[in-house]
Image (cartoon, rainbow, N blue to C red):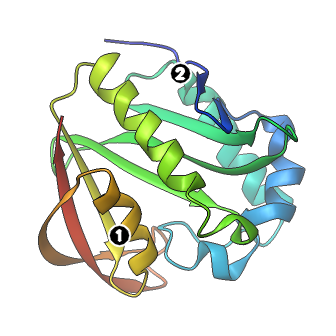
Amino acid sequence: MNMKTPILQTERLLLRPLKLEDAEHIFKSWSSDPETVKYMQWDVHTSINDTERWLSAEEEAIESDENYTWGFELKNTRSLIGSGGICYNTLYNMFEIGYIIMRQYWGQGITSEAVKRIIAFAKEELGLKMLYAKHAKDNPASGRVLQKQGFVYQKENKYAKFSGSKEFDCKEYFLEL
């Protein structure tokens, strides 16, 4: 498979690989916002160094065939407003989709637009047959994004932040492509 993360487009968005130079903007815009990061598996970034470490890892993974991550850039303003992608989940032996978007863009269908394009990439470019997703039960808006794209609820489960600092009850979904 081994495909470099490509640039993708939707009506309103340019989905592009993230770069280390994006760190300051991402830190100020969403990775340091406790409300936006609340249900993510990673902890809120307390310094720009946290964001830089994450982006360095993303840059290193750009040619990996187990990780495809994009920044969501608004075409009309060229502003980076979120990120998302698919990464290989060894527990489920399939790719998992995830996303985050700045609070001021919640509820505008932008995340759904990005997720729809990522799903099309997974199916058309990677030839995937199934995707996995989860969301915290306390974050039903994320579940609506998944349901709009045809993800089917499977069961309740739990997940924890990578740091182990918090655990969430979650809902798990699969999407047949």
Which quadrant of the structure image shows residue 72? Answer: top right
The structure residue drawn at horizontal position 66% and vertical position 40%, both measured from the top left corner, is 71
Is residue 53 left or right of 2 when viewed as pictured? right
**Which tag, 2 or 1, sits closer to the chain's start?**
2
Few, some or many residues within 10 Å of mark 1 (<14, 14–19, 20+): many
Q: In this view of the protein, which residue sits in the foreground, 20 or 80?
A: 80
Q: Secondary structure at mark 2?
A: loop
The residue located at (86%, 36%) in the rendering is 21
Q: What residue lies at 69% left-to-right and 35% top-to-bottom?
A: 18
Give coordinates of residue 27: x percent, y percent.
81, 60
Q: Which residue is mark 1?
A: 143
Q: For mark 2, what is the residue? A: 5
Q: Residue 81: give its label.
A: none
Image location of residue 97, percent across then percent down: 37, 48
Placement of the C terminus among the 4 image quadrants: top left
Left or right relative to 94: residue 9: right
Q: Tell me the CA gap for discs 2 and 1.
A: 26 Å
Position of residue 24 measured from the top left corner of the image (x, y, whole percent):
89, 52
> Tags 2 and 1 in contact by the CB under 8 Å rule?
no
In the rendered image, residue 153, in percent from the top left (x then y), is placed at: 15, 66
Asked which quadrant contains residue 36, the reply is bottom right
